[in-house]
Image (cartoon, grey):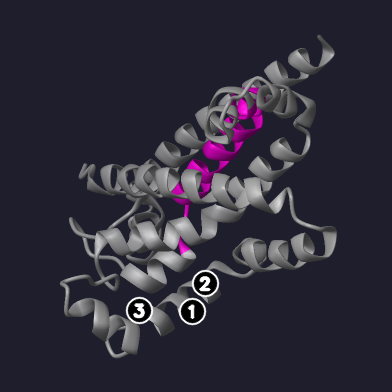
Amino acid sequence: MDWYPLWNSVRIAAISCVLVFFFGIFCAYYAAKLPRAVKGLLDVVLTLPMVLPPTVCGYFLLLLFGAKRPLGIFLAQFGIKFVMTWYGGILAASIVAFPLMYRTARGAFESFDETLAYSGQTLGLSNTYIFWHIRMPACRQGVLAGVVLAFARALGEYGATSMLIGYTPGKTATIATTVYQLWRTNDEAGAFRWVMVDVAISTVVLLFVNLLETRQKKVVRK
């Protein structure tokens, strides 16, 4: 059994998760402070990939980064090519996973008790110190839940990934695209094995999310 799809899926999901974490935290932190009308408009823009079909997201990525598109031609001059490359999967997975990280983190930041930040300011602490040592620890359960959900979404991504990077064994194959290709070629036993691998990983992820939610409820009760 070729384990490349598992390795490639985990690699894409892990790198995407890191990118989504920092960008999602940045957007969520500043969006939580915006006026309601502005925040509502920004929410629509940032969470649109969550409601659009993944294939539509993949289509838009092809319009932007296709080999014959202006942006794709420009990036190709620097040796950067997102179409039919494994790291193109990082772009696709990041786009579809970002809304989960953003919405979860924003909810955590909105529930944060701002008096804690004000207290830190009266002590002369910098905003950066307050963010990483006061705000983030207080919101860690929500942020971690967002990270786990984003990782799971990136790991199971198929639509945008298949549109952008396709399926090439040993090069761009992921668990999701491998299942489809094996099923399409009537290799049901092989497809079922990969389905079980994906189910096992997803189960572990969901159990971890439930554990975080349970711990968060205990903290709130205290």
Task: Tell me the quarter of the picture where residue 184 sits.
Answer: bottom left
Q: Which mark is residue 60?
A: 1
Q: Nearer the viewer, residue 1 or 51?
A: 51
Q: In the image, which residues are magenta?
A: 135-158
Which residue position holds label 3? 65
Residue 149 belongs to the span the image colors magenta: yes
Image side of residue 199 versus residue 70, left or right: right
Q: x, y (%) of residue 18?
A: 41, 43
Residue with the mark numbered 2? 57
Callout 1 secondary element: helix
The quarter of the picture where the C terminus appears is top right
- At which x and y percent is residue 143? 60, 34
Percent across and percent down for residue 136 are 59, 29
Q: Earlier in the sequence, mark 3 or mark 1?
A: 1
Question: Which residue is at a point 39% across and 55% down the rendered structure image?
Answer: 179
Residue 168 higher or lower than 217, as above or below:
below
Please name the amino acid that badge 1 sits on: Phe
Query: Does residue 147 show up magenta in the picture?
Result: yes
Q: Is residue 44 left or right of residue 23?
A: right
Q: Is residue 197 left or right of residue 120?
A: left
Q: Quadrant of residue 113?
A: top right
Label at residue 145:
none
What residue do we see at 71% from left, 36% from top? Answer: 108
